[in-house]
Amino acid sequence: MEYVKKLVGEKTFLTPLLPEHAKLWVRWHGDLESAIIASAPGHRSPGSEAEMREVIEAFISRKWHPFLIVESEGDVPVGWCALVQVDAVGRRATLAVMIGEKDRRSKGLGQDALRLLLDYGFNVLNLNSIELIVHESNARAIACYERLGFQIVGRKREARIHGPLKEDTLLMDLLASEFESRLVLPLIRGV
């Protein structure tokens, strides 16, 4: 499949997420381990391709910014990321991400893709703050977010419950003034 390379990083590129990508979402979100890692409070992983298509269409109709993460080597889709709950007046949004291909995790692909998404959010959408929610037990994700400059700014105690297990969720954010553009601003300045 040929992709539009909207934002190109060192290891990945972001292409617009389309309803046609629903089949990938079925596989990624249908995997129990992946769904547990990715689940946010109140999250439900739809099971059918039609339901996934509806979710993607809802992202698009709400003027959120969903992207498919494609590994540059081989043009292989490995996950997705998005800026959701975009507040243009307040200049903030919430980040969502999933590396769905389990064998591609811990290879720097998520960090590379998120650096592109943050650059897009801060320098194309003109956002001032991007936040995210992460489970306290997801040390790999927290380390990735901290390498990108995110800071923990809040905690919801026992906000995630699976059977008898309860854990806190963390609120992290990053401000535009704390982010260094590697792609968008150099491109804008060169035009």
Image: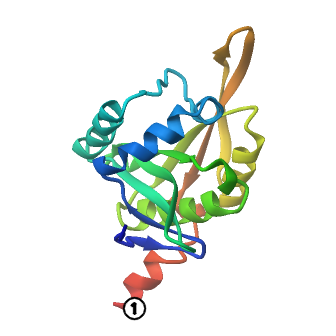
Work out whether residue 60 can be spotted: yes
**Amino acid at dot 1:** Gly
| Number of residues whose C-alpha sits closer than 10 Å to that of mark 1, classed few (under 14), some (14–19) or many (20 or more) | few
Instruction: Judge from the rendering whether residue 129 lies leftward or rightward of residue 58; answer left or right.
Output: right
Residue at far left of view = 61
Query: Residue 23 or 4: which is nearer the viewer?
Result: 23
Q: In the displayed image of the protein, which residue is found farthest to the bottom?
A: 190
Q: Is residue 122 left or right of residue 90?
A: right
Residue at image location 37% in from the left, 70% down from the top: 6
Seen as rendered, the residue at the extreme top is 164
From where the camera sits, is residue 134 visible?
no
Residue 29 picture location, percent across and down: 51, 35
Count of marks placed on residues: 1
Q: Residue 33 or 7: which is nearer the viewer?
A: 33
Q: Which residue is mark 1?
A: 190
The C terminus: image quadrant? bottom left
Answer left or right for 53 relative to 78: left
In the rendering, at what x and y percent does residue 49 appear?
35, 35
**Up-down relation of residue 146 to residue 116 (above or below):** above
Image quadrant where residue 165 sits: top right
Residue 106 position within the rendered picture, expressed as x and y whole percent measured from the top left: 73, 55
| Image quarter (top left, top right, bottom left or bottom right) of the N terminus | bottom left
